[in-house]
Amino acid sequence: MSKHLHVDELRCFYNGHHDKPVVDGFSFAMQEGDIACLLGPSGCGKTTVLRSIAGFHSLAEGQINLAGRQISVPGHSLAPEKREIGMVFQDYALFPHLTVAENISFGLNGESQQYKDTELNRLLELVSLHGLAERYPHELSGGQQQRVALARALAPKPQLLLLDEPFSNLDVELRRKLALEVREILKQQGTTAILVTHDQEEAFAFADHIGVVYQGKIEQWASPYELYHQPQTRFVANFIGRGAFVPGIISDSGHIDTELGPVPCNLEEPGGTRVDVLLRPDDIVANRDQGQPAEVIHKVFTGTANLYTLRLPTGSTVEAALGSHIDCELGEQLSIELSADHGIAFTL
Ligand SMILES: Nc1ncnc2c1ncn2[C@@H]1O[C@H](COP(=O)(O)OP(=O)(O)OP(=O)(O)O)[C@@H](O)[C@H]1O
């Protein structure tokens, strides 16, 4: 099946900075109805890619195709309003002097009155704002305003919806809740969407596929599960989830020997190869009788668990999420062992 969106080898510059591209060799593709996320640290180029897809930034190289149409190539860019792309921004961008109903209807301009009325009701229902149609934006909470912005963006039935940090003005709890709610709405509509964020939990809750972006490129394009369990680069391993690297050596029997014991090997390198192994906090468990000593150097209580940073006898540190009933103070020794069912290692 041919993909709905193709982003091919994008290269982008900003005026006056022609020596160094901010986006370089950037590619991904999406099926219709897919929800993706571009996740990466500040300044890595996420917004530039989103703006290129929306038609606000021209390409130096590469091309973008949406729903069988070429919408951007160097020297030619289809006007943003002709792309059939909807956008939701961080700052809601609602018209302050228009009611909720009028704001949403704005996305239905050019349609017959009967169609407008039916669609408006459907959209109000969809974003659970039925009772608030006559309110003005300043009479709504941040979460409600963002639902209006979403309904307005969905009204023209866009081929693609772009969401640029749409939840970041909201408090953490509401952010997670709204991310899940919006995902449900998009899935219900079959809308293809791309979210840009640097919030990993939000990306995990929202997206089917995540592109981890670093220095203007996609480091890895994968499901949240794969990114966490099979990171393909050190950057992804570090950036996604928690954990720490410890040194290891690949044994002749195909394991990796570490100072905490053997870990299954994910690499096809010969015995004797030196590697760094990523240990996640849930790879380490307490074992009072047969464990190995580790000194508590940092501790965060997270409710269900204590997240410990532990120093091993060689000086390496690891993180361990241990049940909150295991309550040790800084400087105390814990007895731990490895319980990793797969390894994540990188050659030196
Ligand atoms: N108008 C501009 N002129 C020059 N350089 C720019 C401009 N806008 C962005 N940049 C630079 O381009 C790079 C990528 O910026 P971009 O906004 O795409 O990153 P981002 O990943 O979206 O970051 P953030 O998460 O902070 O929004 C950065 O180094 C930034 O400083």
Image: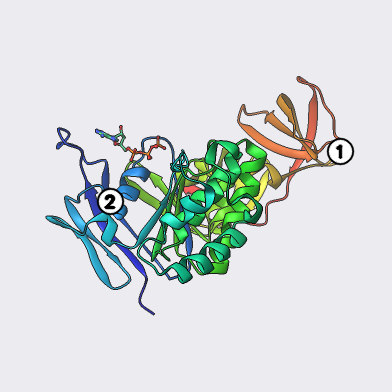
Question: Looking at the image, is 27 positioned above or below residue 112?
Answer: above
Which residue matches tag 1? 288
Q: What residue type is disc 1 on?
A: Arg
| Mark drawn on residue 144 | none
Does residue 41 appear to the left or right of 311 in the view shown? left
Q: Is mark 1 within 8 Å of ligand 1?
A: no
Q: Could you tell me which residue is drawn at 79 percent across and 26 percent down?
A: 333
Question: Horizontal and vertical percent for residue 169?
Answer: 54, 35
Q: In the picture, residue 76 is in which quadrant? A: bottom left
Q: In the picture, residue 317 is in which quadrant? A: top right
Does residue 64 appear to the left or right of 155 in the view shown? left
Precedes in sequence: disc 1 or disc 2: 2
Q: Which element carries disc 2, helix, strand or loop?
A: helix
Q: Nearer the viewer, residue 131 or 280?
A: 131
Question: Looking at the image, is 305 positioned above or below residue 225?
Answer: above
Q: Could you tell me which residue is drawn at 46 percent across and 65 percent down?
A: 116
Can you see residue 113?
yes
Q: In the picture, residue 348 is in which quadrant? A: top left
Can you see residue 210?
no
Does residue 266 appear to the left or right of 108 in the view shown? right
Question: Horizontal and vertical percent for residue 323?
Answer: 82, 40
10 Å neighbourhood of mark 2: few (<14), some, or many (≥20)? Answer: many
Which residue matches tag 2? 52
Q: Residue furthest front?
A: 113
